Amino acid sequence: MKNRVLSFFLFLCVTITHAQLFSGKVLDIVTNEPLESVSIYFDNTTIGTATNDKGEFSIEFTDAVQSTLVVSYLGYEKVFIADYRSKTSITIFLKESLDQLDTVIIDADDGMSRELKMKKFKGEFLGKSKNGQSCKILNEKDIKLRYNKRDRTITAWSKTPIIVKNRNLRYEISFEIVDFEMTIGNWGASSVKYTGTSLYKDLDTKQKKRIVENRVNTYKGSVQHFMRALYNKELEEKGYIFGVEGFKVNPYGYFTISNVDDYGHKTIALKEKLDIFYKDVIESIIQTTVNEFKVDQYGNYAPIPDVLFGGDMGRQRVGDSLPLDYGFGED
């Protein structure tokens, strides 16, 4: 359970049953002037837009969108809006970022070449699967990397979104990294954690059969697929088998699943660590550091850092990720 991949602000408290339009205006907090080309998107989805020359925007969302709305503009602090469902319009004020991290001298010899740091970063950020290896970062030069000899850690950050082109899944991902840290052990990374927000652009406009199959194969057996099956109590029907200390067990003897609450969520409690097998072959592990967590029908769950996956699910990285609005109702 050493590798932990974290997402940032993916869970909300309210669901609705129809599409809604959310609109607003983005202004500089000091000058009150409108800001053009500000990115507005729902985290980890394909749904995004940008402000016009008057600082105005509008964006539509449906039931499948449960993630936080991100307002991002280069040189300014990000704004996260979680309660957009209770509003139809909003004025957002952005203030310039005072982050001085890039002023630190980073080109000094830290005991590891940039080439090697980048190789290790890409291996753990994109992943080492077939999907991960198909990915290319289009703006590597924007990524800052530092190696700490004493702690044997590599940290990474970037002022601009990291643009990832996933050839296998045909997505272009704009990932705004908040934090990345990997600890190097004797046989590779001993722990990895990163946080950030992301917007997906679907490049498969012609719905090519190969790409559709790649996405389906990536989705099935993923954390997203597992969480949806858990919510619907369809774990065995969806191909999951569970074990404890080498013995097959009934998952519902270990998962306690509540009824749906007023917000469309179920509360899940896990009795103890479980081995997960998908299609009898792919092995993962799940355990929690909290007494209970919440999940909705779309596979969103919280608190994310306290639901830990190991094995195959624990190794899934950006290269194996799909947007939260992918394939709902099709699995």
Image: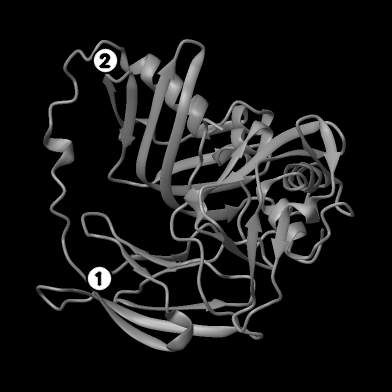
Query: Tag 2's secondary structure?
Result: loop
Badge 2 is on which residue? 149
Q: In the image, 1: left or right of 181?
A: right
Q: Amino acid at mark 2?
A: Lys
Q: In the image, 294: left or right of 93?
A: right
Residue at image location 30% in from the left, 74% down from the top: 53
Residue 206 appearing in the image? yes
Image quadrant holding the C terminus, namely: bottom right
Estimate how packed mark 1 is, as few (under 14), some (14 to 19) or many (20 or more) residues with alpha carbons within 10 Å: many
Q: Residue 7 in the image: state x and y as whole percent.
A: 48, 50
Q: Residue 288 in the image: state x and y as whole percent.
A: 56, 48
Q: Amino acid at mark 1?
A: Leu
- The residue closer to the viewer here, 107 or 127, is 127
Query: Tag 1's secondary structure?
Result: loop
- The residue closer to the viewer here, 86 or 291, is 291
Closer to us: mark 2 or mark 1?
2
Q: Is residue 166 above or below residue 255?
A: above
Q: Residue 77 in the image: state x and y as whole percent.
A: 23, 60
Q: In the image, 66: left or right of 148?
A: right
The answer to which of marks 2 and 1 sits earlier in the sequence is 1
Residue at image location 57% in from the left, 61% down from the top: 293
Badge 1 is on which residue? 35
Q: Residue 159 in the image: state x and y as whole percent.
A: 27, 45
Q: How much space separates mark 2 and mark 1, taking CA atoms?
A: 42 Å
Q: Is residue 240 above or below residue 330?
A: above
- The residue closer to the viewer here, 315 or 51, is 315
| Disc 2 + disc 1, Cβ < 8 Å | no
Image quadrant holding the N terminus, namely: top right
